[in-house]
Amino acid sequence: MMFIGGLGKLKCFFNKSLQSLIILVLCLTGQFAFAKNYGHWYSEEELKYIQSVYGENIRQLFFIDVLAHLSRAERKSLSAVEIEFPLKGRASGLFEYAMHLKTGKMYISALSVKFFDDIAIAMA
């Protein structure tokens, strides 16, 4: 009897996972097939919230948590890195993450972080 209940839970898990995967594939296909502007998906207020909260969390993760596990030489090489969180990237795309190697600036758009957050929640 427990096996049948476990099978039902497994089926539910796969249905949720399949739905999330289909949504992700559709979004990725649309992103690469057409140059679209996704800036209208989220309000400016939502993006400002993401920028302030997630931006600070990512900075702390990088500059406190990650650097604590690196060697002195690795920490020195990353000391020039700056992280910027614009509300949207140049194209207002869903995957606008970039690193300018000469200046050490890392760009992570709030729009991209919000989209990634939504996908992570959908797959949970």
Image (cartoon, grey):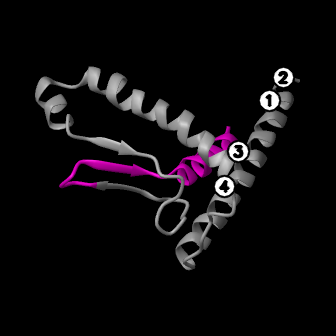
Q: Nearer the viewer, residue 73 or 106?
A: 106
Kind of residue sitting beneath label 4? Leu
Secondary structure under badge 2? helix
Q: Nearer the viewer, mark 2 or mark 4?
A: 4
Q: Quadrant of residue 19?
A: bottom right
Q: Nearer the viewer, mark 3 or mark 1?
A: 3
Kind of residue sitting beneath label 3? Ala
Callout 2–callout 4 Cβ contact below 8 Å: no
Q: Quadrant of the C terminus?
A: top right
123 w.r.t. 72: above or below: below
Per the image, the residue denoted by label 4 is 21
- Which badge, 3 or 2, is on the more N-terminal residue? 2
Tell whether position 48 is magenta.
no
Secondary structure under badge 4? helix
Q: CA distance from mark 3 to mark 1?
A: 22 Å
Per the image, the residue denoted by label 1 is 6
Secondary structure under badge 3? helix
